[in-house]
Amino acid sequence: MPNVLKLREAVCLLGRFPALAGLDLDLDAGGITLLSGPNGAGKTTLLRLLAGLVPLHSGTGSVLGFDLNTDRVSHRRRLALVGHDTFCYDDLTVRENLIFSAKASGRKAAIGESAMERLGLSHVAGVLHSRLSAGQRRRLALAAAFGRDPELLLLDEPHAGLDAEGREILDEILRETYATGRTVIIASHELERTRALSNKEFSIRGGRAYLVEQA
């Protein structure tokens, strides 16, 4: 299987603090990988590094074949990140945000429409992002990510802010994504739930990654 990402001695600094401290990580295409570990271990920084949002201060890295030391932008059209920020526009409606996100990745607007329906947002399609509830904003962020039809999907605590129905919908979509051979990386503290979805786990501790043997 092709390699999706490779990091060697990766160091990322937050100020002077090494959020990633010589991290090594290899991941082949396909499957759902769980990133576990305590708060402040480097999980969010790792996802942001893979998305090209923070630089490598030392070490080497590649994502989807692009060198993170020389090009942190080109691969972004082929991935999606759902983090603590929604990356949606307050002055656009739900539908407009999804169409914009899909087209920005070179996808058809219909994919965004389909994601809107799957995440249960059709009834608020014409509502501005600024007027959505916190749970609806979370669903919209997820719909925007799935609407990009990414090769690599990066999720930071994706179940946070969702009600029980939203969590079940997300789990179902993740299982379908797994079946298509797409690659998903989830950082989460909800270990029982995400371990049931994932086929590989790395524990992030002290800015380094350790493979966890799964039962």
Image (tube, helix red, strand yellow):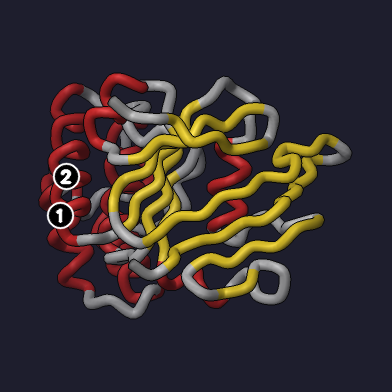
Pointer 1 local density, CA inside 10 Å: few below 14, some 14–19, many at least 20: few
The three-letter code of the residue at mark 1 reads Ala
Q: Label 2 vs label 1: CA separation?
A: 6 Å
* 59 vs 54, nearest the viewer: 59
Question: Which residue position is annotated with label 2?
Answer: 175
Q: Quadrant of residue 53?
A: bottom right
Residue at 29% x, 51% y: name it.
Answer: 31
The location of residue 204, given as percent across then percent down, is 57, 32
**Dot 2: what SS?**
helix
Question: Which residue position is annotated with label 1?
Answer: 179
Report if the CB atoms under discs 2 and 1 are less than 8 Å apart: yes
Q: Quadrant of residue 41?
A: top right
Residue 205 to residue 178: above or below? above
Residue at 53% x, 65% y: name it.
Answer: 63
Asked whether the viewer can see residue 89, the reply is no
* 132 vs 59, nearest the viewer: 59
The three-letter code of the residue at mark 2 reads Arg
The location of residue 110, given as percent across then percent down, is 16, 71
Residue at 57% x, 20% y: name it.
Answer: 38
* 133 vs 115, nearest the viewer: 115
